Image: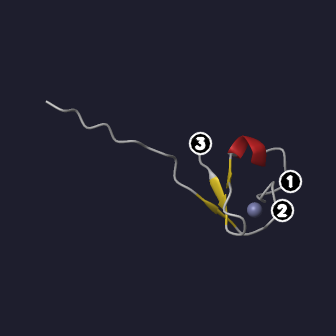
Amino acid sequence: MSYYKCMNCGRIVKPEELSKMRGVRCIYCRNKLIIKLRPPIVKMIKAI
Ligand SMILES: [Zn+2]
């Protein structure tokens, strides 16, 4: 799962929502410039 961020409006588009659209495009402003974000991985540091 990877998220996409629109460079125009700054909204984060989920891949589920992108699948509804044709191609990789912002569903809010239909901007073509959209970057792929890394999946939010939270590193768990165990406190001993
Ligand atoms: Zn946008």
Q: Is residue 36 above or below residue 33?
A: above
- Name which residue lies at 52% across and 47% down: 39
Q: Quadrant of the C terminus?
A: top left
Of the residues tagged 2 and 1, which is closer to the observer? Answer: 2
Q: Which mark is residue 30?
A: 2
Does the CB distance between marks 2 and 1 fall below 8 Å? no
For residue 35, side relative to residue 19 (left or right): left
Give residue 42's position: percent from left, percent from top: 40, 42
Residue beneath disc 1: 22
Q: Quadrant of residue 37?
A: bottom right
Instruction: Give the amino acid at mark 3.
Output: Met
Q: Secondary structure at mark 1?
A: loop
Q: Which residue is mark 3?
A: 1
Residue 19, position as x, y percentages in the image:
79, 45
Q: Are marks 1 and 3 in contact (CB under 8 Å)?
A: no
Element assignment for label 3: loop
* Spot occupied by residue 7 in the image (x, y as percentages of width and height): 67, 68
* Residue 25 relative to residue 37: left or right: right
Quadrant location, ligand no. 1: bottom right
Q: Position of residue 18 (x, y in %)?
A: 76, 48
Residue drawn where x is 44% and y is 44% of the image: 41
* Element type at mark 2: loop
